[in-house]
Every structure is written in structure tokens, then in C-alpha cells.
Amino acid sequence: MENEDWILMQEVAQGKESGLRTLYDRFGTLVFRNACQVLGSVSEAEDATQEVFVQVWRTADRYDPTRSKLITWVMLISRRMFIDRLRRRMVRPHSISLDEGLHDIASADTRDNEMKEGSAAIRRRMSELPELQREVIERVYLQGFSLREVAEQRNMPVGTIKSALSRGLGRLREKFGMEQSG
């Protein structure tokens, strides 16, 4: 796979449309899904996903399969782009009155506290899951591995990993009082 990834990235670096299309087919959905989670807006996630693939295209010649898997490299670029977008969103200058500014600061503090509380609650709920469920959720959603890759890492059937993911997400939904969708 490393050799295939390197060849693919060489095609992308050479500007071959087929290489970029293959790269997008492999990682576009994952990058977009993560962008939606981080940025919270479909339209902003679409823009960010496009930016990520432009950046991947511009830096394709720097990809080194001996240092990381291609998915890891793409997700690191994605993460940096999303963080940059969030930072730009926070420092975007605009003129406001003093009253509006104080209200915005108070609102931001409230949102920050809510996010910290939510994040802590998620960590608590995740720690209550059985080890396999917790590990599968972390590897798939936070580390960007596919179900097949997790199955290979754990030396388990893909069906077992899918079931663990499904059960783990179901338990998290129950613990947060969310209705299951889909």
C-alpha cells in the first residue's frame, strides 16, 4: 500500500487529474465529515474540504510514505486547515460598539464553557464504554482509520469491528439522551 500511495502522490504532484480524482475518492468523504464536525457548517466544510485538497495537491511532492500513511498525512493537513479556519473566525476584525463587544465576549465565554463541559462529558462517557468500543470509535473518528484498518490492527473480523462501533455509538447516544438517526 505504501508504494501505491507514493505512486498516487507522484501522479498528483505531476498534476494528473486521474491522481487527484483517486485521492479525492479515497479521502474526500472523510475530510468533509471531519470538516462538518469541526466547523459546524456544511457550506464552510465544503470550502474547507476544497482548500485541503488544493493544499494536498500543492504539497504532494513532499509526501513520504516512510514517515506516515497517506491517510495520516491527509488528515494532518486537514486538521491544520480546520484549526486555521477556526482561528481566523475568532480574530476576524469587524467594527462593533463597546456594548456589542462586551456581549460578544460574554457569549464567547459561555460558549467556551459549554464546549469544555461538553468535551469533558464526552470523555467521561467514552471512558465508560467497553475497551473495544472506545478504541474503535477513537481510531475511526479521531485517528481517521477505516474499519478494515482497525480490524487488521486488532486482528479481528471487520464485522466485529463494525458491531463494536455501532454498539459504542449507540451507547453514547443513549448516555447523551440522543435519538438514533439513520
Image (cartoon, rainbow, N blue to C red):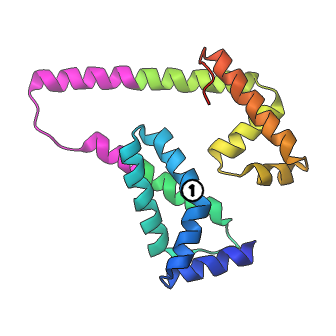
Residue at figure coordinates x 76%, y 25% from the top left:
129
> Of 55 and 165, which appears nearest the observer?
165
Which x, y percent locates residue 175? Answer: 66, 16
Look at the numbered disc 1 and give the secondary structure of its residue: helix
Which x, y percent locates residue 4? Answer: 71, 76
Q: Is residue 61 shown to the viewer in this render?
A: no
Q: Quadrant of the C terminus?
A: top right
Magenta highlight: main SS: helix
Extent of the magenta region: 83-111
Q: Identity of the amino acid at label 1?
A: Met
> Of 73 and 151, which appears nearest the observer?
151
Using the rendered view, name the quadrant where residue 103 is placed.
top left
Relative vertical location of residue 7 with respect to residue 159 in this rendering, above or below: below
**Residue at the outermost front position:** 182
Residue at figure coordinates x 41%, y 42% from the top left:
42
Residue at figure coordinates x 30%, y 47% from the top left:
88
Name the residue that disc number 1 marks.
75
Residue at figure coordinates x 14%, y 40% from the top left:
94
Left or right: residue 147 compared with residue 158: left
Which x, y percent locates residue 150? Answer: 79, 49
Relative vertical location of residue 166 with respect to residue 26 in this rendering, above or below: above
> Of 168 and 83, which appears nearest the observer?
168
Q: Is residue 27 shown to the viewer in this render?
A: yes
Asked if residue 100 lies in the magenta stretch, the reply is yes
Left or right: residue 90 compared with residue 75: left
